[in-house]
Amino acid sequence: MPSLGRLHLITDTRPGRDPLTVVRAALTAAGADLVVQVRVEDSATDREAYDLARRVLALCAPYGANCLVNDRLHVALAVGAAGGHVGADDLPVAAARRVLGPTGVLGATARAPETAIEAVTAGASYLGVGPCHATDTKSGLPDPIGPAGVRAVTGAVDVPVIAIGGVTAARVAALRDAGAYGVAVVGAVSAAADPARATTELLRALTC
């Protein structure tokens, strides 16, 4: 199974965003330390998701960075991504594991120890845990769980926990102290005036 980087960049495909430019800048700063998760809006077609994932994978390849596809596992398989990530409303983790096979990276969303244990038992390679803080990059999210919520999950499982939701470089230390292996971001990089510099600052916070 491919190694899992500590910094996950989720593509921002909201109107006015340029996900490929952001991914390219982040890769120049992070290289193989970056994992790019391709996420598209619910309204996007499978063809649009496929085209974006294919282009992101091509950007990642020269750096040896892994690419995952969120939600649409058939797209992950079609482009040859390292794996995928499923949320609470997507395929059950056990079914997703059957789709990806035994060697693909499979992330699952959890926010409590009980659901985290269930996801790992069903075959999750890592957990995306949150939202840790308030965020406007995705609607309909539950209340933030904060570092204390992250700590409760990390104490219950033995797979990497990737903290997500309102993550900034300044908040990384508290999340690492809570046991998080890494973080996933959207706006902290995609909305930055200098995405490469923002990526560097996040990596520094993760590794210092």
Image (cartoon, rainbow, N blue to C red):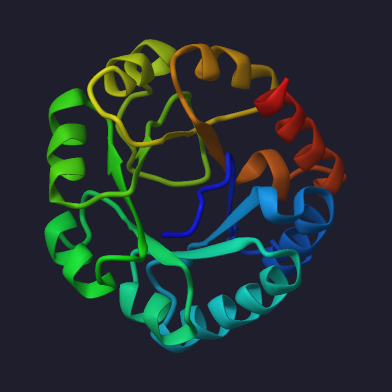
Total label count?
A: 0
- Which percent across, then down, holds residue 49? 48, 78
- Which percent across, then down, holds residue 131? 40, 31
Position above or below: 197 against 12:
above
Tell me if 199 is positioned left or right of 64 in this view.
Answer: right
Q: The N terminus appears in which quarter of the rendering?
A: bottom left
126 and 12: which is toward the camera: 126
Q: The C terminus appears in which quarter of the rendering?
A: top right
The part of the image, by quadrant, that contains residue 162 is: top left
At 60% from the left and 58% from the top, the residue drawn is: 12
17 and 57: which is toward the camera: 57
- Which percent across, then down, holds residue 135? 51, 34
Position above or below: 43 against 144:
below
Position above or below: 60 against 206:
below
189 and 157: which is toward the camera: 157
- Which percent across, then down, holds residue 62? 75, 72
At 55% from the left and 12% from the top, the residue drawn is: 174
The part of the image, by quadrant, that contains residue 15 is: bottom right
Tell me if 30 is positioned left or right of 102 in this view.
Answer: right
At 78% from the left and 65% from the top, the residue drawn is: 21
Position above or below: 54 against 25:
below
At 38% from the left and 63% from the top, the residue drawn is: 84
Tell me if 69 is positioned left or right of 21 in this view.
Answer: left
165 and 128: which is toward the camera: 128
